Image: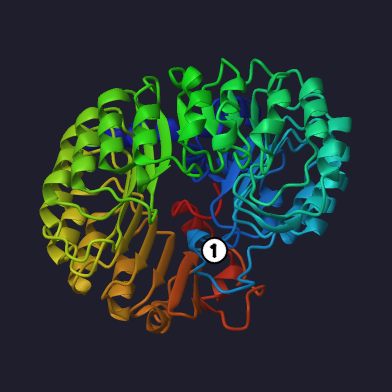
Amino acid sequence: MEGRRQRQSQELLQQQVVALSDENLSRIFELIESSQERATLSLVCRQWHRVDGNTRKNISIANMYAVAPTALTRRFKCLEGIKLKGKPRAAEYDLLLPEWGGYAYPWLKELATAYEHLKTLQLRRVEVRNADLYLLAAAPFNATLQVLHLHKCSGFTTSGLVPLSRTCRSLRVLSLEDSDVIDEGGEWLHALAQNNSVLESLDFAVPGLDTASVEDLAFLVGRCKSLVSLKVGDIDMSDLAGVLSKVPFLKELGTGGFSALGDENKGMTASINLPQHLTSLSGLWAMPDLGLQMVQPVAANLKKLDLKFTVLSCRGHCELLSHCFALEELQARNVLGDEGLQVLGRTCKKLRRLRVENDDAGYISHSGVVAVAQGCAELRHLTLYICDITNAALAMVGQGCLHLTDFRIVLVSKVQFVADLPLDDGVKLLLKGCVNLIRFSLYLRHRGLTDRGLAYIGEYGQKLKWLLIGCTGESDVGLASVAYGCQQLERLEIRDCPFSEAGFATALVAMNSLKYLWVQGHGATEAGSRLLSLSLPCLHIEVSPPEQLLAYYALREPRTDGPPELKVLVSNSSNHQQGGCQFLGESRNGCIL
């Protein structure tokens, strides 16, 4: 009886679904903002797939080689926002071959042809040439483009920005965040100042951009009354003071440098008044302890603070952080030391994001980790480069940071001997406490985590979607434990771990949600042929020196824009012509979102 009722209920639901017209279904889909939910609903039937394509406004492509640009524009007709990622994360650490790929041109050419009303374009780790920027400037959507974000991109110069500055007059956000830009003059800023009056956010805090005119910047901020975020490059603070006086309501500021600050002009920073409404402060290039007198008047209101580029001492860090009661995000180098983390734990009770990068001038240890875990209960993201760590410290993170969703730890080699290895028990207690963790990175030393520790990741890390392990594990048994336990894992990165090619193949088959595997070190090159023999539809495998492997699922032909040393292998490539991998690709959430 119960089975019969269930069948009747399913039949009724199917009839109701079929009865929905495209118009009514479109109204429903327009209320759904989550790309993951959209991707799932589009698999219900052909009608839902079609309606999703016709109503989707924003899309994110996590791997530009997973889908062809023409396939994107053919399915999604009315996109207004596109986020595109190119090179793997390894590019940020110079681990890829020169001329690896990630070129913007094929994508920008297709977007310029297909969309007339694009409003947002975000490129991350993409190789962008000046010709690509010229193409954007001449695209049909140049009048509607409001947001252009080039994040960690490379290959272009400031000359390429000139046409954009002249034609894209509706730009509200222009960001070159962390990009590698060659300075060929400041004409781009002059053109932007002459042609734009609606800018809300400008970020050109890029090292080496020292030809930008302060006069042009002052003219620009004077015209753009809605400007709330300004981050500049190599402009000295003594020259920036006049500009800041024109934007008293600025909320985000990335300052210039402090090269003119010395003992002979100690009072210079005291005479610079930062906007009183600031909630975010970054830049502070080469700011010494003397610069604190400029920052302290606004410290109590700051929610975001980036101290990576300062030359503050440990004492200077402690003094500044003791005034930051509202701080929610902090980036620094480990020169702040355990003392700085202890001040952070006592003062910054609202802290949600902390990133401490490596620096030869200092170090942090397990005592600093414990101080943060005990004092910053609201943490969501924690990244630490540390010299010493204990199981007890990791357990404390699991006990004190219950809301943590992203935890990354790198054990640097400043201390020759770390007493409390392996960290198996600490990882277990951390994962048991941080039940919402979805991103987890452990880069340790050999035998810093045994197969037992990897088994704990598989057992207690069932919500993980991204995992990086480095110098961990003992055998394929540990990798198999992760693979069979972490069934929601989508991205797996492995460096210098003792796994065999057979182990990689077994893991790839076991992880149903995995869409991206990157391996460097032992067994990477040999694993390519073993993965190829699996005959998994739509699996692309890239093998390159020195001992690197990249495997991902794609709904397109293999790429041909890599260097000669890079070999691209495709498993069961006939499915590309027959369309057999479309369902697989979408079910893995990796190709079209």
Residue that carries the numbered disc 1 in the rendered image: 554
Locate residue 185, reporting x and y percent.
82, 50
Which quarter of the rendered picture does the N terminus lie within?
top left
Locate residue 254, reporting x and y percent.
60, 34
Task: Say which residue appears at 67% left-offset and 44% top-offset.
Answer: 234
State the residue in front, 24 or 66. 66
Locate residue 377, reporting x and y percent.
25, 28
- Judge whether residue 335 can be spotted in this image: yes
Task: Say which residue appears at 40% left-offset and 28% top-offset.
Answer: 320
Task: Say which residue appears at 78% left-offset and 51% top-offset.
Answer: 158
Near mark 1 (Cα within 10 A), the count class, few <14, some 14-19 or many ≥20, is: many
State the residue in front, 247 or 439. 247
Residue 518 placement: quadrant:
bottom left
Q: Secondary structure at mark 1?
A: loop
223 w.r.t. 10: above or below:
above
Locate residue 289, reporting x and y percent.
45, 35
Name the kind of residue labelled 1 in the image. Ala
273 w.r.t. 16: above or below:
above
- Residue ranking furthest to the front: 264
Task: Say which residue appears at 19% left-offset and 31% top-offset.
Answer: 374
Residue 337 placement: quadrant:
top left
